[in-house]
Amino acid sequence: MSDFNPNDPFGFFASMMKPGGTNPFMPPLTEEEIDRKIVECKTVEQWLAMQVGMLQMTVKTLEMQKAGLAAFKQSIDPKPEHS
């Protein structure tokens, strides 16, 4: 039985670094091992997708804060209009 834990997204990568651990460049030998690797890869893919989503949301929030700050500064100190 595998010691893979889907709640530990880095466990898959750590297992690749262990001596005698699974090698991602060697083909799996059994159907069960292939199924396990599919589940591991899908778990990592889902975790990465979630991280990308959070990063995109952070960027959007910072962009909105920047625009809000610019609007606030402009309302406090408007530039004089030239006639």
Image: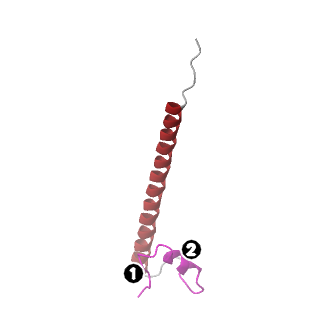
Q: Position of residue 50 (x, y in %)?
A: 43, 61
- Secondary structure, mark 2, is loop
Q: Which mark is residue 32?
A: 1
In the picture, which quadrant includes the N terminus?
bottom left
Bin the neighbour count of mark 2 within 10 Å (Cα to Cα): few under 14, some 14-19, many 20 and up: few
As for residue 11 lying within the magenta part, the answer is yes
- Amino acid, disc 1: Glu
The disc at residue 25 is 2
Q: What is the secondary structure assignment of the residue under circle 1?
A: helix
Q: Which residues are magenta?
A: 1-23
Name the residue at the front extreme: 76
Judge by depth and name the residue closer to the eye, 70 or 40: 70
Q: Residue at x 52, y 42 (%)?
A: 66
**Does 17 appear above or below 67?**
below
Instruction: Tell me if residue 23 can be seen.
Output: no
Q: Residue at x 41, y 77 (%)?
A: 36
Residue 59 counted in the magenta span:
no
